[in-house]
Image (spheres, coloured by chain):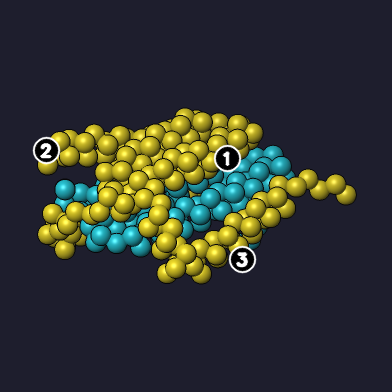
Chain colours: A cyan, B yellow
Amino acid sequence: MLPASYYVALSAVLFTIGVVGVLIRRNPLIMFMSIELMLNAANLAFVTFARYQRSLDGHVFVFIVMTVAAAEVAVGLGIIVAIFRQRGDINIDDLNLMKW
Amino acid sequence: MAAELVLFVILAVVAVATAVAVVVSKNPVYAVLFLVINFFALAMFYIVLAAQFIAFLQILIYAGAIMVLFLFVVMMLNLTGAIENVQDRLPLQRRAAVVLALVLIVEAGVIATTGAFRQAAVPAPVGGNFGTSGPIGAKLFSDYLLPFELTSVLLLIAMVGSVVLTRRRTD
């Protein structure tokens, strides 16, 4: 087996790519996909530690993270579709109605 | 060890390259397809790490269900390129993103190379049914029964919420 640091480092790189994607893109769909990248990086870390600790608790957490991701995508894409119907376009910078 | 390292490097290159492609691609359809490849590479990692059940869940739920949902919305909205061309109102954000990414990478590198992760080079082998659905199901229905039931409520709320959000007003 490789040292756990290999998998942890890969997970960190994938998470960082997701962070950068959320920050530099203005397309809400790509931002959502970057969030999925971050969730998957966390899942990879969970599975790695589950293997190296020989404990199945990490697998259960991955299960729950997948459920949360599915719920988040369903609601988030619903919001995007609703805004697109209302305004005709979806520019992230214009969506500041709830800013105080 | 050597074969495992070669496999790791190939899968890691695929995973990182497709992740970068998701972030930089102009067309959201291509981004979705790159993300599917990324999920398959991660599923291979899960199989290497003795998590067969999670690997198949990854392919079924992520690459199957969630990405189909994404593709539907991408095709329906047809946003290609239109919004990236408007002028950026937060020019500092890109530079901040680069700085933040460098800080995160350095921090993760320090943690991964100096911490306790290095010494666990040879973990004890696991039994044949370690990552299969049986033991995970037993854990879900004993130790994690309350979180498991709460996820069903969460999914119900998400379902009702998305139906309400996308309903056309008829008045």
Residue A12 placement (x, y as % from top left): 29, 52
Q: Are marks 2 and 3 in contact (CB under 8 Å)?
A: no
Which residue bears the numbered disc 2? Answer: B2
Checking the image for residue B96, the label placed there is none
The residue drawn where x is 16% and y is 63% is B116
Q: Are marks 1 and 3 in contact (CB under 8 Å)?
A: no
In this rendering, the label closer to the viewer, 2 or 3 = 2
Q: Are marks 2 and 1 in contact (CB under 8 Å)?
A: no
Residue B114 placement (x, y as % from top left): 14, 60
Residue B97 seen in the figure: no
- Three-letter code, disc 3: Trp
Say whether mark 1 and mark 2 are on the same chain: yes
Instruction: Answer few, some or many: residues within 10 Å of disc 1's Cα (few below 14, many 20 plus, some between 14 and 19).
Output: some
Which residue bears the numbered disc 1? Answer: B69
Q: Is residue B16 above or below residue A100?
A: above
Q: Chain of mark 2?
A: B
Instruction: Answer few, some or many: residues within 10 Å of disc 3's Cα (few below 14, many 20 plus, some between 14 and 19).
Output: few
- Three-letter code, disc 2: Ala
Residue A44 placement (x, y as % from top left): 33, 51
* Side (left or right) of B128 relative to A81: left
Which residue bears the numbered disc 3? Answer: A100
Residue B60 seen in the figure: yes
